[in-house]
Image (spheres, grey):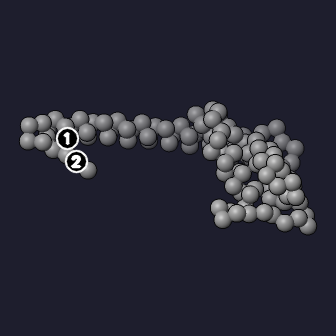
Amino acid sequence: MLNLSSCRGILLFERFEEARLSTMYKSASDRENFRVLFDTAIERAEKGLCKLYGCAFEQAAQESKAGGYFTQALIQAGNNWKGSGVFTLRNAYEIAESTVRQKNSQQTPESELGRRLYHFPFAVQP
C-alpha cells in the first residue's frame, strides 16, 4: 500500500522504499544465518534413526480439536524456546514428554533417540 500526498509524496515514497529494502536485506541476511546454523547442526548430528511416540504401546494418545497432545506439546516446546544456538530433538522431546504427562497421566510418550553426543536440530536461533 502506498499513500502519497501532493506535498511530500515523492519523499514518502523514497523513504518507504529505502525502509522496505533495508528490511528485505536484513531478512535475507537472517535467513542466511538460520540456514547456515541449521545446516551445520544437521552435519554435526550423528547419523541414525530417531523415533518419537506420542504414547507407550497399548496406550491411547489423547487429542483435542487442535490435534494430538504430544504433537501440540512438541510444537509448543519449539515456539517457547527463547535461547540461541541449537534446540535439539532431545530437548524438544523432554519438554513435550513432561508437558503431556502433566496434562494426562494416562499417556506416556516414548522415544528412541539413541545414544548421541550431538542430536538432530529441532529449532535454531543465531
Residue denoted by label 1: 13
Compared to 37, does 102 lie above or below?
Answer: below
Q: Earlier in the sequence, mark 2 or mark 1?
A: 2
Mark 1 Cα within 10 Å, few/some/many (few <14, many 20+)?
some
Residue 91 in picture, x, y percent from top left: 76, 41
Amino acid at pointer 1: Phe
Q: Secondary structure at mark 1?
A: helix
Residue 122 in picture, x, y percent from top left: 68, 46
Query: Left or right: 50 with respect to 30?
Result: right
Amino acid at pointer 2: Leu
Which image quarter: residue 12?
top left
Compared to 70, does 39 lie above or below?
Answer: above
Residue pictured at 66% horizontal, 51% vertical: 75
> Contact, CB < 8 Å: mark 2 with mark 1?
yes
Foreground pick, 41 / 22: 22
Q: Secondary structure at mark 2?
A: loop
Label drawn at residue 2? 2
Residue 81 in picture, x, y percent from top left: 65, 39
Residue pictured at 63% horizontal, 35% vertical: 82
